[in-house]
Amino acid sequence: MEISQQSTDQAILAWARDDHGKPQIALDPESLYRYGHLIRLTEQLVLDQFSRGLVSGTTHTCIGQELTAMSVVRALNHPDDAVLSNHRNHGHFLTYSGDFVGLVAEIMGREAGACGGWGGSQHLVHRHFHSNGVQGGMLGIGAGLALARKLHNSDGIVAAIIGDGTLGQGLVYEAMNLASVWNAPLLVVVENNGIAQTTVSSHTVGGDIEARGAAFGLPTWRLADDDPEFLAKVDGVVNTVRGRRGPGFLVIDTRRMGPHSKGDDLRDPEELEQIRNRDPLAALGRFLPADVRNAIESNNRQFVEAVRQAADASPEACLRETPAHIFEQPAQPEPMSVPEIPAGSNVRQAINSTLRHLLDSDKRVLVIGEDLHDPYGGAFKVTQGLSTDFPGRVISTPISEAGITGAAIGLALDGYLPIVEIMFADFLTLCMDQLLNHAVKFPGMFPDVSVPLVIRTPCGGRRGYGPTHSQSPEHLFTAVPGLTVAYPSHRHDVSGLLANAVQRWHYPVLFLEHKLLYGEKLDPADYTALDSADDVATELFPTLRRGADDPDVTLVAYGGMLPIAEAVVRRLETEEELAVEIVAPALLSPLPRDSMIGHLLERQTVVVVEESHHDFGVSAEIAAALLESGFSGQLLRIGTPPVPIASARSLERSIIPDEQSIIDQILDLF
C-alpha cells in the first residue's frame, strides 16, 4: 500500500529530494521543525505499535534528540557522502532516506520494510547508509570507506555516529588513529547524552571527551543541540571536514527524553522533568507562529497515520524457502589473467607472485597489513618488493587487527578488492567481531551488497613460537556463518586459489597459510581433484585425492598437516602393507558435502588428521556430516588436545600430532 499523494504533499511540501532521494531540508525554523516533528511522531508510532503487539525485539528511539539526529546527516550533500549509524538510528535513517514506511514496516517485520525484515530496528541500509547494533563496530568500516573516498579523489565524506557510552570501545580509537594516519575524511560524531544504557557517563568515561579527538590530531568541535544556531554550526563543521578532506571529531551535547529502549526509564523524575523542559524540538516549535506550528503538526499526524496504514497493510516478511547459506555460485568464469609461477617456486614465492600480478592487473586490489613495507616485507616475507613497486596500494598499518579488518570491509563495500595480511593467525581473534557481526552480515542480509574481502594469515606450530604464535584457529572460524575458510597445501594451485578468492568470490574469505609450507616447493604430484558436484565454491577451492582406489584407510588432511600425512602413508604402505588414500580439501567452510563427504561415504575407514584443537572442530564437522549421511565405517579423529601449545620444541612435539603418533593411533584401529 502506498501513502496517498495528498498526505505526502502535506507532509513533505517544504523540502525537495536530491537525485538519490535524500530529503533536502532547509535551515529555516519551519523546515527544521516540520522534519524533526515528523521523526518524533514516527518513533511514537513505533512505540504505539509495540504496545499493540505489532513490534517484537527491541527499538531505541531518539525522542528528544531529533535535531541532533538530523544535524550531520542533513548537512551531507555530496553523492558519495556516507553515514554509519548505531542502535539509535531512526532519525539518521529518516533524514538520509526519507523512507518512513520502510522504517516502520522494517521494525514491524513486514515485506515493505527497508530491508525486507532482515534488519529490524538496528540494522538498516539505504544506499551509503548502514547501521549496526554492535557499539563502535562500524568505526573501522568508516575508516575504510573514508580511505576509499580519498583513493578515488572524491569530495565525499563519511560520518560515523556513536554515543558517548561507546567511548569505552577500543575499535573507536583504532579507527580514529587510522583516519588520522591516512588523513581520510572520517567525521566521528559523538552524540553525548550523558548516559549509556542506565549508567551515567561520569561513571564510564574517564577524562575529557574532546581530548580524545585532539589526541589523534583531529580538528575537534563541541556543540549543543539546544543552541539556536546549532544546525547552522553543524553545517560549518561538515563543510570544514569536506574542505580539509581529512578527519574530524564532533561532540554534540544532547539529552534523550525516553528510556534506552522500550523499558522503564530509571532516571530520577526531577532529572526527566529538566530534560523535558530543555526539549530543543519543542523550543523550535515555540519559535514559530501558533497557526504555522499547528498546521505542521496536523499535516504530520495525517502523514504518520498514512504510514501506519501502509505498514499495517504490508504482509509479514516470509521466506519461500529457508536458505541453506548466503552464497551464490560464481558466474561462469570471466577471462581471468593468471600469473605465471616460475617452475620450482615455493609457496611463499607463488603467493608473492600472485599478489604482484593482482596488483598489476587490477587497480581495485589493495594489500593491507602490519609491516608489509620494504625492505621488511612482512613477518614471513610474503609481500617483499611489493610496496616499492606499488606505492600507496601496499599499505603498512598500525597494530590494529580489528581496525584493519573493519577498514578492509569498508574498502570492499566501496568496490575495492582488499587483501589483508594478519601477521599471525593467533591474532585473528581480534578480528572476530568484524568478521562475525559485520563482514558476513552485509551479503547475508542485504541484496546486491558484496564484501569481496580476503584475509591471509600464517598459522600453525612446529617452530617453537609458543602459545600465542603457534595456533591453528580454523576450528573457530569455520563456525562463522557466511565466512569462507580456505586452507590450501603445497599440492594445491595456491596461486590460482588466491586469485579465485580475490577475483571471483565476492564474499569474505579467510585464507590460511601454514608457516612450514612457505618453503615447500609447489608440486601437484599425482593428486587429482574430486568432482565439485553441487558444492558451493569447490570449483574455486578444490578437494584433491591420491592413492588407492579401494583403500584400507583414507586419511583426510589439509594445510600444514598434509606433508606429515604423506610421510605416514609411505610408512603404512611399506611397513604395514596397507592400501592408503589421502583426501586433501582446500575448502573447510562451507564444507564440501556432496564432493568430499560423498566420496568418503564409500570408504571403510576414515582418519581425519588436523593440527587445530579437534574438539568442536573441522574433524568433528566432517564426522557429523558422515554420520548424518549414513556412514557405517570406522572413523578416527586425530588433532591437538585442548591445551596451550608449548614453546619448548620437546613439549611442542608431544602436543601437536606427529608422524609416529598418527601411525600408532591408526594401527590401533586394526
Image (spheres, rainbow, N blue to C red):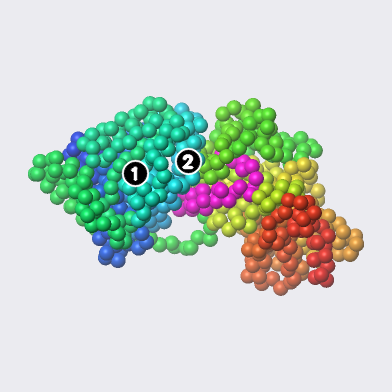
Question: Disc 2 vs disc 1: Cβ atoms closer than 8 Å?
Answer: no
The picture quadrant where one finds residue 291 is top left
Q: Which residue is the site of mark 1?
A: 191
Q: Nearer the viewer, residue 650 or 136?
A: 650
Is 199 situated left or right of 547 in this image? left
Residue occupying the point 32% across, 40% down? 252
Does the magenta segment cover residue 434? yes
- Numbered badge on residue 563: none
In the picture, the quarter occupied by the N terminus is bottom left
Amino acid under disc 1? Glu
Q: Is 398 or 458 nearer to us in this picture?
A: 398
Residue 488: where, in percent of width, then height? 70, 49
Looking at the image, residue 182 sits to the left or right of residue 124; the answer is: right
Along the line of sight, the residue nearer the viewer: 79 or 4:
79
Task: Give the residue displayed 70% in from the left and 62% down from the top.
Answer: 641
Badge 1 density bin: few <14, some 14–19, many ≥20, Cα 10 Å: many
Magenta stretch secondary structure, dominant: helix
- The answer for how far apart the CA atoms under marks 2 and 1 are is 16 Å
In the rendered structure, which segment of residues is drawn in magenta?
A: 418-446
| Above/below status of 4 relative to 381 | below
Image x and y of residue 206, in percent? 41, 44
Q: Which mark is residue 173?
A: 2
Which residue occupies 30% across, 59% down? 266
